[in-house]
Image: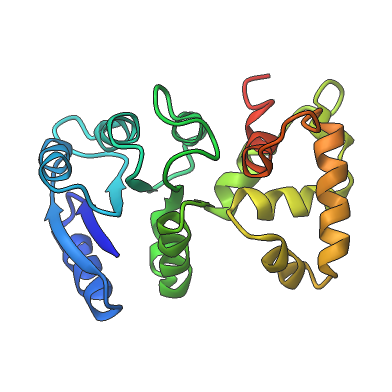
Amino acid sequence: MRVMLAEDSTLLREGLVRLLAEEGHEVRAAVGTAVELLAAVEADPPDVVVADVRMPPTHTDEGLRAALEIRSRLPEVGVLVLSQYVEKRYATELLTGGAGPAPGEGAGVGYLLKDRVAQVDEFLDALERVGEGRTAFDPEVVRRLLVRSSHTDPLARLTPRETEVLAAMAQGHTNGSVAARLHVSQSAVEKHINAIFDKLELTGRSDGYSKRVLAVLRYLDS
């Protein structure tokens, strides 16, 4: 894949450049600011952008804002953002996409904790999923997104197994991958997914991929 990196830590940025090159990916640009990233993407759109959430000059959300702008202006470019901490609002905003493509449309999107980058296989797997147009959300991010109050939230109606399936779906795993992770049959996973859609009132939608993402999004703001 053609990849662009935006990370203000020189050590991490250069480490990622070397890792991606060794894996056969083409790093088209590796920059330290969101402004440089937007200029590079505008000049030569890559397949996937990997960007830190917090970047100069304020180290708040410059990287996220750049990612959202890329999703809005160039929906064919996948976006994988990295964060030191789980920031629920940022993860939600990235998934909903602001003015960008709706869930299930356009390129892939992902949100990983920086600690996950040290798990090289998991990082590369997430990058591949985003490059394929799927989601790749850190398991800890998904866990935080699924923490709800039990008396009013439809997610509380899910069984423990359905919650496990939903978490794996939100991370971007296919039905076959979910089955392998949970050591159940693929038909069992499909039954759990249908039950999730029913309980979250998503059965009327025709786009299966959108339903998978919306199953996590539907009640984030409740």
Q: Is residue 40 left or right of residue 219?
A: left
Q: Is residue 145 above or below residue 7?
A: above
Which residue ends up furthest to the front in the rendered image?
206
Residue 100, image x, y percentages:
40, 28
The C terminus - image quarter: top right
Q: Nearer the viewer, residue 86 or 38?
A: 38
Q: Residue at x 69, y 25 (%)?
A: 219
Q: Is residue 27 left or right of residue 211?
A: left
Q: Is residue 25 left or right of residue 188?
A: left
The N terminus - image quarter: bottom left
Q: Is residue 134 left or right of residue 27?
A: right
Q: Nearer the viewer, residue 133 or 88?
A: 133
**Quadrant of residue 187 in the image?**
bottom right
**Quadrant of residue 121 in the image?**
bottom left
Q: Is residue 90 above or below residue 163?
A: above
Q: Nearer the viewer, residue 22 or 113?
A: 22
Residue 19, image x, y percentages:
27, 74
Residue 55, image x, y percentages:
21, 39
Q: Residue at x 16, y 43 (%)?
A: 37
Q: Is residue 31 above or below residue 104?
A: below
Q: How is the image coloured?
A: rainbow
- Count of numbered tags: 0
Q: Residue at x 63, y 44 (%)?
A: 209
Q: Residue at x 10, y 39 (%)?
A: 39
Which residue ends up furthest to the bottom in the rendered image?
22
Residue 46, image x, y percentages:
23, 52
**Quadrant of residue 154 in the image?**
top right
